[in-house]
Each structure stands twice: as C-alpha cells, then as structure tokens.
Image: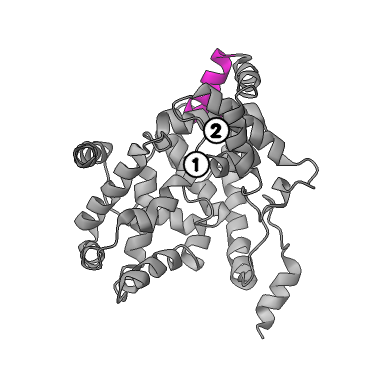
Amino acid sequence: MDTNNDNAKDRISRIDSYGFERPDGFDYASYEDFYSRYMTVLTRRAMKWSKMMQKSTAVEKGIKVKRYIRKGIPNEHRPHVWMMVSGAQAQMETNPGYYHSVLLEGQKNTKLVDAVVTDLNRTFPDNVKFRKNASPCLQLTLHNVLVAYGQHNKTVGYCQGMNFITGILILVTKDEEKAFWLLDALLGRILPDYYSPEMMGLKTDQEVLGVLVKMKIPAVAELIDRHDVMWTLLVSRWFICLFIDVLPIETVLRIWDCLFYEGSKILFRVALTLIKQYQAYILEAKNFPDVCDKFKDITKGKFVTECHLFMQRIFTEPGSLSKSTIERLREQRRAQLLSQE
C-alpha cells in the first residue's frame, strides 16, 4: 500500500477545479509534489500578467506578449486573452446579436439539432458539470453553441470532436457567446480544414507529422514504416481533439494558450516533443499492437503532468519549425492525398 499516495489523496480533491473526476490509479502524491511547485510559478505569472493588463487590456501581439503566453496565462485572464489574440473579440464586436440570431435559426434545423443532441451525454462523462443533474448543467450551453455554430458554418455543420473542444471553451470562458466566437476562430482560421466532411486538413496534418518525424526522429519513422502502422491510427485523436482527453487538462490549456496565439504549428511541436522524449521507449515496440500501445502510454505520467516544464520543452526539443516549412509540406501532402482519391 502506498501511504504517501493515500495521504495526498486525503488532501487533494477527487474532482479538479474544472469539474473533471480524477481517474482510478491517479498518482496523487506526485501531483501534489508538482502542484506545490507550480503554485509558485502561477502566483508569479499572475502578478506579471496583472501588471501588464493594468497598462492595457488590448493584448497587442508582440515579443513580450508571446513570451508571457508561452509561460502560461493565469486562469483569471485566460478568457480575455484568448478572445483578443484569436481575433474572436473583434468578430464578436463587429457582429452584435449575430450569435443569438444563428442559434434561433439553428434550432429549426432538426437534422443539425439531432446530431448535436446525440453527442451531449458522450461529452466529458467524467466531468460533473456536464451531467444532467448538475446545477447549472453545461449540456444546455454546449447544445446552444454547437447548434449555433452548425448553422453559422453549414459546410462543417456538426462533427464529432467539436463537442469536446466546445466543452473546454465553455469551461474556460463560462460564456456561451464567447465560446461560439472562439470556436469560430479555431475552426475557421486557426485549424486548416479539420472538421469539414472530408477532413482534408486533419488527414494532411497527420501526414505532415509523419514527414516531420522522418526528418527529426528518423528511427521512429523507420519503425512505424516497418510495422506498416498508419499515422492516423496513432495520432488522429491528438489532432482532432487538440489533445483533450489525451493529456492532463492543465497541460491542454497551456497548449491552447499558444495555439490561439501562434496557430496550428503548436500541435506539431507537442506531438514531436512527445515522440522525441519517448523515442527509446517507442523503439522497444516489437509489432503493430505494441506501437499503438506505446503511443497511448507516452501521453501519461510525470512528463506531461509537469505542464510548465513540458511547455518549455516543446519550444526546444523539436528544433526549428517554421510556418513556411509546414505550409510547404501541407501543400505536398494535400496534393498527394487528392491524387489518391
């Protein structure tokens, strides 16, 4: 019996501050150790952010803001900063009343409403705030944002995966109109065509990751080729859910801080860092199922829980990763995928 873990379990709530239940086998002792150190970082960051926000709430893009965002946005400033740097705030101010009008229209679209309703109970079953008996129950807010977005972007409509992303936006902003405009920023501008019916952007980016692994971690790429494993089997959940339900929530939010500011290349940095960190472990794989299991394992444990150190590593571990390189690879892979259809 692990006495340290049992003692820590008595001190730490079974439900985290976002409403997620900690899973069975959760390592309370190492989490307590990490969080006691991380609290110092959070306090220091909060003071710096408050000082900067007192001067101006505009959050102009620049070297200082980029550095601050990479080091983490405090919870109290996160909704505002995400809205500002993603362009969502500007869209909301330019289109007053738009959200409520598309929500009203969307509610008349029975096909869209049915698709959304089907997934409501499947969204974060481990989160007490999304349960039917919760007060307030966030399922209604989730329903509204997804219906409004499906009406707003008819090409996409509703697609599985969007419910988890929207759920996180609601937990962070606590405001359905802001969640709608942030979803629009993500799906309309930041992520290239991930959720259209063909999911061409998603398929392309999985292929691009494969090329980047070949360039930067060739031994792993060779192993994956040898066992004939498709990248989509290994990483589709990483990309489609933007690491939700893959990595710990604190780490996901830190990744999203950078995603809203720096764009989708952050997803490649995270994926490459995980693969590079666990290269030796992945290379132990003897067969196809082994490879799949190892890719599930590398998203758990101390390395991903220590979100502050993890975020430092994503900007050093993969080396240089320019937007132009990613765009060039995207064009090449997209052309190849289209020629195969």
Q: Are marks 1 and 2 in contact (CB under 8 Å)?
A: yes
Relative image position of residue 148 (x, y in whole percent): 59, 26
Residue pointed to by mark 2: 81
Decide if residue 170 is on the left or right side of residue 14. left
**Amino acid found under the numbered disc labelled 1:** Asp
Which span is picked out in magenta? Answer: 83-95
Decide if residue 136 is on the left or right side of residue 331. right
Relative image position of residue 9 (x, y in whole percent): 71, 71
Residue drawn at the location 36% of the way across and 70% of the way down: 289
Relative image position of residue 321 (x, y in whole percent): 27, 45
Dot 1: few (<14), some (14–19), or many (≥20) neighbours within 10 Å? many
Residue drawn at the location 22% of the way across and 51% of the way down: 211
So how many labels did they put on this image? Answer: 2
- In the image, residue 73 sits, relative to residue 281, either above or below, namely above
Quadrant hosting residue 7: bottom right
Q: Judge whether residue 122 is colored magenta.
A: no
Residue pointed to by mark 1: 257
- In the image, residue 141 sits, relative to residue 255, either above or below, namely above
Q: Is residue 175 among what the camera can see? A: yes
Q: Is residue 54 among what the camera can see? A: no
| Mark 1–mark 2 distance (CA, rounded to whole Å) | 8 Å
Relative image position of residue 323 (x, y in whole percent): 28, 37
Q: Nearer the viewer, residue 27 or 295?
A: 295
